[in-house]
Image: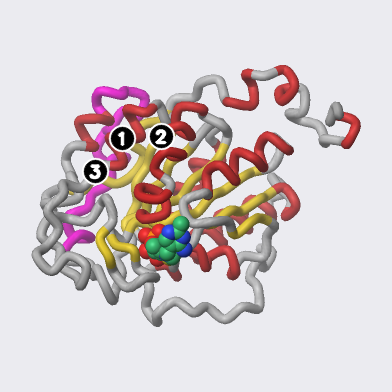
Amino acid sequence: MPDISTNAKPTWCPGCFNFQILAGVKNALSRKISTHNAKKEDFALVSGIGCHAKIFDYINLNGVNTLHGRVLPTCLGIKVGNPNLEVIGFSGDGDAYAEGMEHLIHAARYNADIKYIVHNNQVFALTVGQPTPTTELGYKDKTNPLGVKLMPINPIKMMLNAGASFVARVFADAKQVEWVLEEALEHKGFAFIEVIQPCIIFHPDIGVKEKTYMLQENRHFKENLGDALKKAEEFDYNTINKIPLGIFYQKERETFEEKWPQLKSLIGRKASWKDIKR
Ligand SMILES: Cc1ncc(C[n+]2csc(CCOP(=O)(O)OP(=O)(O)O)c2C)c(N)n1
């Protein structure tokens, strides 16, 4: 498989689960390149700001390391400029659900062909562990000495309700990440992938992994929105009961790029400057 590593030395903490995500992403992308299903130039990677965002430095593909919370509008801009690029965004839970929340809802609704990976460690890790919208009740840090009092959101439920055409969650295990990204790359439309990524310093795994099970091994029918919503409710990011992983929902519908003739005409061919009317 082609090596898509860079020379940058990772600055994640030793043992950080981001290494698992990096390995899974690199395996999925280099396999796609090695089997001639894509060239290196076909990919555009976008990352936000935070520990997760450093993944951008460790994969030797084109892209933009953008502003905090602005991964999705950057992805959409790239897609509109050239709908033939395979655009993959990376965010943390702060980046996606706090600073970037308004973009997330609309990205699901627009259904542009973008793959979006959220590294959810339930804290703002790079800035030393402040709570995010998915932190559980009672979590204490210096900014919340009395403990978090606001209910966490459930991003899987939110994405299903907002119209995302592919909604998945996996644990930060290289094999799971590789599998789900390969599935998402085959999907045409907005693919939302949440990765449960314990932060070994500020939000360690408090028995999450043992409670996980794979939907795809339990006769889950991923085209049924009602079933997907029911499964999404099994884990509320607060109490750890059963935690379903895998693809909750997948159903293709018209993409953002297909809705406008100006963009649709670019699909399948190289854009040229002549396409831009001044
Ligand atoms: C607009 C803006 N607000 C706040 C910050 C400060 N900031 C930098 S990194 C970060 C935390 C990022 O947390 P998250 O997105 O969850 O990623 P993680 O570090 O956990 O991977 C924050 C709040 C910033 N850089 N820009």
In the rendered view, tell whether residue 198 sits above or below residue 15. above
Q: Identify the residue at the far right of this view.
A: 274
Task: Name the residue that disc number 1 marks.
Answer: 158
- Tell me if label 2 and label 3 are in contact, CB under 8 Å: no
| Mark carried by residue 201 | none
Left or right relative to 8: residue 215: left
In the rendered view, tell whether residue 114 sits above or below residue 68. above
Give the magenta-colored segment's residue range.
207-227
| Mark carried by residue 153 | 3
Marks 2 and 3, how far apart in space? 13 Å
Is 137 magenta? The answer is no
- Tell me if label 2 and label 1 are in contact, CB under 8 Å: yes
Marks 2 and 1, how far apart in space? 8 Å
The C terminus lies in quadrant: top right
The amino acid beneath tag 2 is: Ile
Local SS, label 3: loop
Task: Name the residue that disc number 2 marks.
Answer: 105
At x 66%, y 38%, the residue is: 79
- Tell me if label 3 and label 1 are in contact, CB under 8 Å: yes
Left or right relative to 90: residue 214: left
Where residue 204 sits, quadrant-wise, is bottom left
Local SS, label 1: helix
Where residue 227 sits, quadrant-wise, is top left
At x 32%, y 27%, the residue is: 161
- Going from N to C along the chain, the mark reached first, 3 or 1, is 3
- Could you tell me residue 118's position as x and y percent? 41, 52
